[in-house]
Image (cartoon, rainbow, N blue to C red):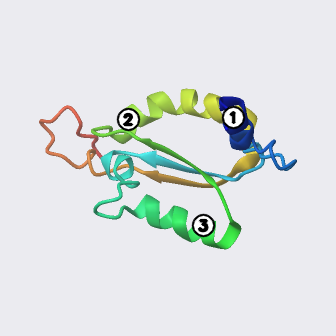
Amino acid sequence: FSETYFLKKIKGEVSGITFSTQHRPILLLFGDSITQYATKADPLGWGTLLADEYTSMYRSADILNRGLSGYNTRWASLILPQMLEELAGQAGRVALVTVLFGANDAVVPSSRQHVPL
């Protein structure tokens, strides 16, 4: 088999079936390190379990893990506009969004990560 054959096969062109990710739903995971490691295989992360459950019901989805280790809600709010801009053209594909921050906010007040209530 030639390299062209494999490239066409990856694109779904060999059998006449076209393959596109343009219409696949997006599951967006946004949060701190708990989210960052959500898709780890060992131990099995909650993001992996979520993806498995979703794909077993709806066939496929694109998982966008935007977990940022060490971030608190204040820092996350600074990068949120950039992240939303990245997804602007795909807003109709977003099926689920998780926002999980707070663990780093709750550190002792003397820490730079602390966010007062």
* Vertical arrangement, residue 31 with respect to residue 4, above or below: below
Q: Earlier in the sequence, mark 2 or mark 1?
A: 1
Could you say which quadrant of the image residue 12 lies in? Answer: top right
Residue 18, x across and y down, in percent: 83, 46
Q: Which quarter of the rendering shows the N terminus?
A: top right
In the current view of this chain or complex, which residue is farthest to the front?
1
Determine the residue positioned at 68% across, 65% down.
59
The residue indicated by pointer 3 is 54
Horizontally, residue 38 falls left or right of residue 17, namely left
Q: Are marks 2 and 1 in contact (CB under 8 Å)?
A: no
The residue indicated by pointer 2 is 74
* Vertical arrangement, residue 85 with respect to residue 39, above or below: above
Crowdedness of circle 3 by 10 Å Cα count: few (<14), some, many (20+)? Answer: some
Which of the two marks, 3 or 1, is nearer to us in this view?
Answer: 1
Residue 35, x across and y down, in percent: 39, 51
Residue 80, x across and y down, in percent: 52, 33
Which of the two marks, 2 or 3, is nearer to us in this view?
Answer: 3
* Vertical arrangement, residue 82 with respect to residue 92, above or below: above
- Give the alpha-carbon distance from disc 3 to disc 1, as whole Å: 28 Å
Q: Secondary structure at mark 2?
A: helix
Determine the residue positioned at 72% across, 45% down.
21
Horizontally, residue 114 falls left or right of residue 21, namely left
Crowdedness of circle 2 by 10 Å Cα count: few (<14), some, many (20+)? Answer: some
- Give the alpha-carbon distance from disc 2 to disc 1, as whole Å: 44 Å
Determine the residue positioned at 30% across, 40% down.
69
Could you say which quadrant of the image residue 7 lies in? Answer: top right
Q: Amino acid at mark 1?
A: Leu
Q: Amino acid at mark 2?
A: Arg
Kindly identify which numbered label has been placed on residue 63.
none
Q: Earlier in the sequence, mark 2 or mark 3?
A: 3
